[in-house]
Amino acid sequence: MTDNVILSAQNVSKQFGGRGDLVARGLARLGLARPRPVVRAVEDVSFDLYKGEVLGVVGESGCGKSTLGRMVAGLLDPSEGQINGRAPDANTGPLPMQMIFQDPFSSLNPRKRVSDLIGEAPRVHRIVSPSEVNAYVADLMDRCGIDASYRDRFSHQFSGGQRQRIGIARALAVKPEILVCDEAVSALDVSIQAQIINLFMDLRDEFGLTYLFISHDLGVVEHIADRILVMYLGRIVESGPAEQIFNDPQHPYTRALIDGVPRLDRRRTVYEPIKGDIPSPIDPPKGCHFHPRCPLAEARCRTERPVLRDIAPGRQAACHLIETTAIEGEPKWPATKTG
Amino acid sequence: MTAVLDVRDLDTSFVSPSGTIAALQGVSLTVNTGEILGLVGESGSGKSLTGFSINRLISPPGKVVGGQVLLHGQDVLTLGEEDMRQLRGRRIAMIFQDPMMTLNPVLRIETQMYDALSAHESITKTKARSRAIAALDEVGIPAPEDRLRSYPHQLSGGMRQRVAIAIALLHRPDLIIADEPTTALDVTIQGQILALVQRLCRDRGTALIWITHDLAVVAGIADRLAVMYAGRIVEIGGVDDVLDNPAHPYTRGLIDSVPARGTRGKRLNQIPGRMPALTDLPKGCAYAPRCPRATAACEAMPAIEPISDTRAVRCFHPLTGEAS
Ligand SMILES: Nc1ncnc2c1ncn2[C@@H]1O[C@H](COP(=O)(O)OP(=O)(O)OP(=O)(O)O)[C@@H](O)[C@H]1O
Ligand SMILES: Nc1ncnc2c1ncn2[C@@H]1O[C@H](COP(=O)(O)OP(=O)(O)OP(=O)(O)O)[C@@H](O)[C@H]1O
Ligand code: SF4
Ligand code: SF4
Ligand SMILES: [Mg+2]
Ligand SMILES: [Mg+2]
């Protein structure tokens, strides 16, 4: 690992289902239950996370974003492969990763006051001494834009935007280096979403945070991310600097995705979307997962898995048609045009 | 152009022992033949209530308490229940964010489509079947004959939404009210539904109200745009006019807070505070506590006034294209 790499994922896969626990396997052997189908939620994914960057993860529902995020945050163990974080040094303490969810309060104790929700973990992990907890919580609330006078309120007394701020303050309380944000602004109205996005950017500067920023909203990711991973059915299909991915997508799926996103400056658009449904991850298409929907698919796409390889400095894509030099010019099919 | 729908001064309230909440106040809008009107606003602004009120689907404690809903000149608010039931589904259809609002989970698609057809016309099973197949085919469902045998849970979310749209279109309604029908769908599937709805409106001249919180979606498909805030329409006009030269400070704020191309690395504009609860509205303009242009005059309620032949805005100090 180079100095800048704060976390590195190597050939990480995650399967759900299949063998099941001892009881399930026993029942299956006796023919009393069917073995559960195997879901390959994440398949052979490798990437580096650089210190201080915002790495965006995009892709459609079920492509494995949350599963990947949970593995990075240490909430889930990979089935195969490894995720190597930098060894925690003296002043980062024992909890270098924190995860922020769509609604962090849905999983939290509604009978706890805000001050406890934020202050409990740092007290338990001895990040601050008991006498300093109050001041510590007040400072965090202030930095996250919650009036410290609300410290004795309960979670249900806050709006969605305020709840998200409390969730962020709670995550920051254990001094993480990496924040994994899973659809952290997706449930918020735009005016509130803007407040939270700005807060994330301020905190990045203030605390030197590194983000894995998962969202299905490409507008948000384009705004916030430095680099992007594009996922499809458990695999990374393209990665690279955000600006390049958005201005010059190479993988046919990335092109379809970016061309299909409604934008404020696209008026009376005639959508000519990519065909077909997203296939099931239980029985994904052979070869390139995208081939049944890909307008450029060839014979070998149906049998041969394209490997993720370098196509330009800092850029990777997994497509048989993309050689080491980038595809030039316009997409070969118009996904949208303005009429 | 003729107005298919002309809503005038619609008021909808919720009545409870602790008082009456005015949830919609003075909502006026028109939709013409073949036109798509985008209805946008943040959560709780009254978009769905507007759609439900037009279709008379408000149930107690909610009630439409004032105004007119003219469908081809006829006020649907004065119709009897039976006439209204005939009208609903035949001349006005609704599509919801959750297609299971339209679909029955325990019935095959074929049965549901037959029921929808026979509710408004006498039709043989054979005829109904071929109409259903044609309708499914039109919304891009592959192998429609096979799909007729399916139950809703055997279909993907995008397919279910297509079936709901096919059912909404069975009687060739004059007006469709679509309430966030693509919000739960993925980008590529959303694109398919947008393309479908666009084509159907264009080919058939159906008038459409597309309700969404996503400005970018309506930017792409709407001809005109109405912006709601706290139960009122604050601005209405052509989509280019409203998005390129918003007149209401809230519209301006909303547009500027959308993360998009060209905002990379910059701070997003953020509107301070949040929309007030309906029980807690300020006396005058509901946007005043968040508005950078507010003055003492805004302690009164601004009326919605035309600022050109095609636009109207509810503001004492509308923006006129100068730097804000
Ligand atoms: N605990 C689990 N058990 C079984 N299957 C699971 C589990 N968690 C996730 N999956 C499956 O793994 C796949 C990837 O799910 P994941 O939640 O990571 O996708 P996602 O990209 O986050 O989707 P979304 O955009 O809908 O949040 C899906 O098919 C999902 O159904
Ligand atoms: N039964 C009810 N009693 C009191 N108020 C209600 C009731 N139903 C809805 N409301 C209020 O009416 C207002 C408008 O709701 P509506 O569902 O139309 O909002 P919306 O713009 O569609 O929001 P969203 O984007 O969240 O769907 C909200 O403030 C809501 O709280
Ligand atoms: S490998 Fe083949 S099917 Fe897959 S994206 Fe490339 S061209 Fe399309
Ligand atoms: S009326 Fe006043 S407070 Fe309301 S939007 Fe206009 S300027 Fe702002
Ligand atoms: Mg997810
Ligand atoms: Mg609604």
Image (spheres, coloured by chain):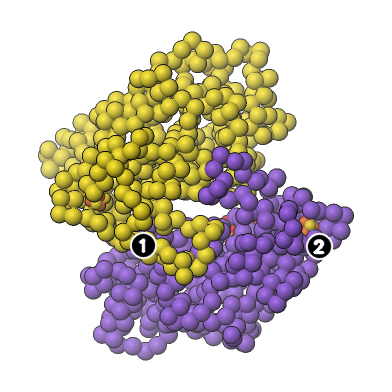
Chain colours: A yellow, B purple
Residue in the picture at 39% in, 79% down: B170
Q: Residue furthest bottom?
A: B122
- Up/down of B290 relative to B8, above or below: above
- Up/down of B90 relative to B294, above or below: below
Tell me if A171 is positioned left or right of A337 in this view: right
**What chain is tagged by disc 2?**
B
Residue in the picture at 68% in, 61% down: B246
Residue in the picture at 22% in, 55% down: A297
Q: Quadrant of the N terminus of chain A?
A: top left
Mark 1 or 2, which is nearer the eye?
1
Q: Quadrant for residue B114, please give it.
A: bottom left
Tell me the element at label 1: loop
Residue in the picture at 67% in, 53% down: B253
- The label on residue B234 is none
Q: Which amino acid does label 2 sit on?
A: Phe
| Residue B28 picture location, percent across and down | 68, 73
Q: Which amino acid does label 1 sit on?
A: Pro
The residue wearing badge 2 is B316
Are the residues at dot 1 and dot 2 in contact (C-beta closer than 8 Å)? Answer: no
- Up/down of A252 relative to A142, above or below: below
| Residue B262 picture location, percent across and down | 55, 48
| Residue B57 picture location, percent across and down | 56, 71
Whether disc 2's CB lies below 8 Å from ligand 4 is answered yes
| Residue B200 picture location, percent across and down | 42, 76
Foreground residue among B184 and B194: B194
Foreground residue among A183 and B59: A183
Q: Do circles 1 and 2 both sit on a common chain?
A: no
The residue wearing badge 1 is A334
Task: Say few, some or many: other residues with alpha carbon within 10 Å of mark 2 (under 14 / 14 to 19 / 20 or more).
Answer: some
**What chain is tagged by disc 1?**
A
